[in-house]
Image: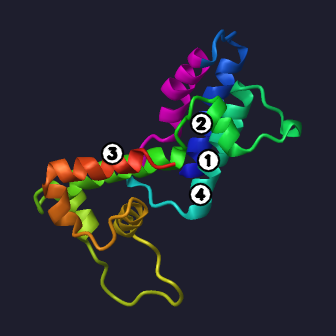
Amino acid sequence: EIRRRIALAGTSFAKFDKILWKSLETKLSVFNASVIPVLLYGCESWNQTHMQEEQLNVFENRCLRRILKVRWQDHVNTTTLRERASNQPFVSSILCKRRLKWAGHVYRMDKERYPKMVVKWRPQGKRPRGRSWKRWSDKVKEDLALVGELGLDIQEAAHDRERWRKIVWTASNRT
């Protein structure tokens, strides 16, 4: 799914290559309005690996380098690239924010609703050998750990809307 999203976003970005853009603000506005939504469509339900998250960031950096006309020979690091792009947030932080926002909705739902049932469902039987796969709820816990909310009772915190908004806001402002 993530590879497909990257390919679709790349196609969307390529369409704007022929358009003559004037200012950097316009370029970034078009990028944020047309490419990022295609790239992150449905990301709230993704359970991506660290490598897949890096692929998303690499794609975004490649687009930003193209917008800013930075060649690889210029040896511009990611931090400098972000500064030139008016501190454009990383795709991974947008992803984290959206997942936490959706998690708040899911954990506030009645237990009869399908999204809540899917999150709470545990399969029967033995698991295969090796490290177990991470579930979506594990990824939400990882996101909470990134914003300094280790050991948080997600169910309780999600019902406190003001607290949950602060958590989501913190996630959206991390780099």
Farthest residue, direction right:
73
| C-alpha gap between disc 1 and disc 4 | 9 Å
> Magenta residues, as a range?
25-43
Which label belongs to residue 8? 2
Q: Kindly identify the amino acid type of the residue bearing the numbered disc 3.
A: Trp
Task: Please name which of the two marks, 3 or 2, marks the residue nearer to the observer.
Answer: 3
55, 119: nearer the viewer: 55
Callout 2 amino acid: Leu
Does 108 sit left or right of 18 as displayed? left
| Above or below, comparing residue 63 to residue 158 in the picture | above
Left or right? Give the position of 110 relative to 58.
Answer: left
In the image, is residue 45 part of the stretch drawn in magenta? no
Marks 3/1: CA–CA distance: 20 Å
Distance Cα–Cα, label 2 vs label 1: 15 Å
Q: Amino acid at mark 4?
A: Gln
SS assignment for the magenta stretch, majority: helix
Give the amino acid at mark 1: Asn
* Other residues around mark 4 within 10 Å, as few (<14) / some (14–19) / many (≥20): some
Identify the residue position indicated by label 4 in the image: 52
Helix, strand or loop at disc 3? helix
In the rendered image, which residue does mark 1 sit on? Answer: 57
x, y percentage for residue 70?
Answer: 78, 31
Residue in the foreground of this view, choosing between 173 and 38: 173
Choose the circle earlier in sequence order: 3 or 2: 2
Q: CA distance from mark 4 to mark 2?
A: 15 Å
- Secondary structure of the residue carrying tag 4 is helix
